[in-house]
Image (cartoon, coloured by chain):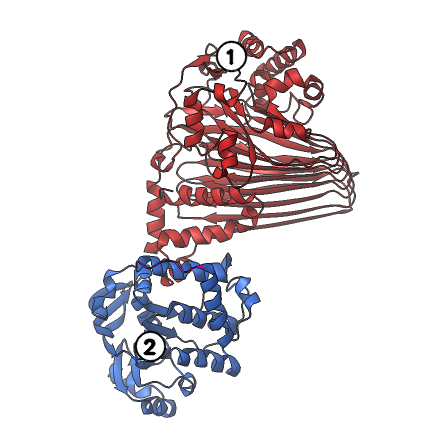
Amino acid sequence: MLEINDLHVSVGDRQILKGLNLKVAAGEVAAIMGPNGTGKSTLSYVIAGREGYSITQGEILLNGVNLLDLPPHLRASSGVFLAFQYPVEIPGVACMQFLKAAMNAQRRSRGEDEINTPEFIKRVREESEKLKIHQEMLRRPLNSGFSGGEKKRLEILQMALLQPKLSILDETDSGLDIDALKTVSEGVNSLRRPDRAFLIITHYQRLLDYIKPDTVHVMAQGRIQKSGGPELALELEKHGYQDYVSNEAA
Amino acid sequence: MAALQETVTQVATLDASAYKYGFTTDIESEKAPKGLNEDIVRFISAKKNEPQWLTQWRLAAYQRWLTMSEPSWARVHYPKIDYQDLYYYSAPKSTPGPKTIDEVDPELLRTYEKLGIPLREQEILAGVQTRKVAVDAVFDSVSVATTFKEELAKAGVIFCPISEAVHTHPELVQKYLGSVVPVTDNYFATLNSAVFSDGSFVYIPKGVRCPMELSTYFRINEQNTGQFERTLIIADSDSYVSYLEGCTAPKRDENQLHAAVVELVALDNAQIKYSTVQNWYPGDSDGKGGIYNFVTKRGDCRGENSHISWTQVETGSAITWKYPSCILRGNNSQGEFYSIAVSNGHQQVDSGTKMIHLGKNTKSRIISKGISAGRSQNTYRGLVSAHRKAAGSRNFTQCDSLLIGHSCSAHTIPYIEAKNNHLQFEHEATTSKISDEQLFYAMQRGLSAEDATALIVNGFVREVLQQLPMEFAVEAQKLISISLEGSVG
C-alpha cells in the first residue's frame, strides 16, 4: 500500500531524511520508533504534504500513485490521514461544520455525492459514542479550549468518519492519561481492516501495549535503521536507542 | 508557507473580473449641468417640486458647506476631489415618477433582475424569495420603484421615496429631517443636505411591528455622477422594524462619489435593526476606479428603552469612511454595532462606530471584525463616550482583525471618554493571521486552500453574520468568499 523509496528531505540547509525506505502493506499496522529529533514528525508531514520541506530525492507511493505530485487536499481525498500531535484550533468553526465540510470536500474530489444531513448526523453519533465524545463538544469551535484528551479523541473521530486507507498517528499517546489512551486505542483498533494500513509514530512502548503492531521500524539519523516484529519494541524499551545513534555517528 | 502563498497569489490576482455587478445599463438620463452652485441646488429642489422650507434648508446647507473643509483625519489617501467636475443630479429619462411597476422602464427592471432584486410583487409572491421583503430601488438620483406599498399601508407603515414623503407627509419629514445628523454635522453630510436627491423614508406608527423586512437597493449607473441619498427612518413608540440596505455600481475607471446620510429615530420602547451589505465597485487590481463611500449614519435612541442596532458587511468601495453611530439619549436605551469589513486589492477602509451614552443605564455593544488582504488598509475607529448624567452605563467592545498575506495592514483606534464614575466600559482587541498550521490542518482533511481560507474566515466573522437576517447572511457569506478568493460565485 505505502512504499517510500530513497526519500531525502531537508529544511533550509539541514538534511533531515537521508534516503529513507519503508514499505507498509495493506492491513498492516507499522510502528515507527526512534529518539527525539530524528525526523519522525517530518516524515509524517512530508507524507501528508505540508509545505516548507524540500524533497530533494525519492518518491512516496500510495497504491502506486506518487503522493509528491499531489497537493495536500488531494492526498487526503486519495486516502491519507494524519492524526496530529498538536491538533489545531479554528475559532468560530464548530466541529460538526468542520467534519461535514471535510467529508464533503473529499467526496466531491472523488466524484461522489455529498452526504445528506440526516445520514451525516447518524454517522457522527455512532462513531462519537464509541469514542465517548459528547454531542455538546461537537457543537463547540474546533479544538478551541479542548483538553489534550478531547483533541486526540476528535482526531480519531475524524479518522473514523473519513475512512482513510493510510492513517498516520503522530505521537498520539502524548498528553493522554491512561483512560484516554485506552479509549483512543480501542478507537484505532476498531478501524483495523485488511484494506487499511496504519503508521504509528511514537517513542514509547506504552502505546504499543494497546495498539499491537505487526511490524516495528527503528528510525534514527534520518533513516530506518532496523525493522522487525513486535519484539523489537520491547528490546528498545530495555536498551534504548543508543546503539543506533552511535552506529551512525561512527 | 506556499499554501498561504497560494492564497495570497489568488487574492493578488483578484480584480474587477471578480466583481459581478460591474455591468452598465444603457438608459437615457436627464442630468443637471456639471458642477455645484446655488442654481444647481435650486434645480434639484425644483425637479422634486419641493416646498420652500426645504429649498431654503438646502441652500443654507450649501452656504455652510462652502465654509467647511474636507476632513483629513481618516487613515485613507486619495487625490483631491474636484467637486465642480461632478454631476449632482441624474435620473433615468423615461420615468417621470412611475405610478405602478408596469410603468417602470423594462430596461431598469432588467437591471434589478440581473442584480437579483425582484421588483415585481407577483414574482416575489410566486416564491422567488422565501420571505416577503419590500424593496425601494434607487437608481442614480431617483427612486424607480417601491414594492408592497399597499400591504404596508394597511399596517399603517409608510415606506416610500423621501422625495414623495416630502409631499405626502411633510409634517414628519420637517420634524425629523436633520434632527439626528444636523445640517452642520460634517463636510460630506452638509454636502448631502444641499444636494440629496432621493432615498427611502420609513415611518412605523405606535405599537406596530412592521409585517415584513424593508429594503432599499442603491445603484449608481451614470458616469461622473455623485450619489447623495438620504434615508430617514422613524420608529414611533413600541414599534419594530428591520431594514436592509444593499448597493452596487458598474465598473468605471474614474472614482465615483457616494455621500449618503442615514438618520434613524427610535422613540420609547421602539427597536430598529438596520443591516447593510455594501458591495460598491472596489476598483481594479491596480487600484484604479471604485467608489468613494463617505457616509454618515446615525441613530438616535430618543425614547426610553429604545434599541438601535447596526449590522454591516462591507466588502466594496475603493475607500470607505463610515461610522454608523448611536446616540443613547433615552434612559435604558441600547445601541449595537456589528461589523464585518473586508478589504482587498488597494481598498482602504476607515470605519467604526460611535456610542454616545447620554441617558442613565444605557448599554452598548460593539463587535467589529476586520479582514485585510492584498495591499489593503483596514482601520477600526471607534468612540465610546459617557456623559456625566449617564450613570450606570455599560459598553462592551471587541475588535478583531485578521490579516491574509504580508502586504496589508490593520489598525485599531478606540477612543473612550468617561465623564462619570458609575460606568463599566470593556474593550478587547486582537489581531491574528490565518496561520499555516490552520490552513494545513484543514487541507489535510480534504479542503482546498481556497475552501480552507473561506472556512477559517467564516469562523472569524460568525458572531456578526448571526446578526443578519437569514437571506442576507447567506448572501453576505458568499460575498465575503468572493471578495477574498477571486472565485466566481
Provide the chain ID for the residue under circle 1: B
Tally of numbered discs: 2
Provide the chain ID for the residue under circle 2: A
Give neighbour class at mark 2: few <14, some 14-19, many 20+ (Cα, 10 Å).
many
Query: Vertical placement of A122 versus B413: above or below?
Result: below
Find residue B267 and report its horizontal and vertical position in percent: 74, 33
The residue where tag 2 is placed is A199
Q: Is residue A114 magenta?
A: yes
Query: Vertical placement of A68 versus B278: above or below?
Result: below
Question: Looking at the rendering, in which quadrant would you find the C terminus of chain A?
Answer: bottom left
The chain coloured blue is A
Q: What residue is rendered at 35% in x and 72% in y? A: A41
The chain coloured red is B
Name the front one of labels 2 and 1: 2
The residue where tag 1 is placed is B36
Magenta span dominant secondary structure = loop
Q: What residue is rendered at 33% in x and 92% in y? A: A231
In the displayed structure image, the side of residue A51 where residue A7 appears, left or right: left
Question: Looking at the rendering, in which quadrant would you find the N terminus of chain A?
Answer: bottom left
Report the span colored magenta.
A111-116
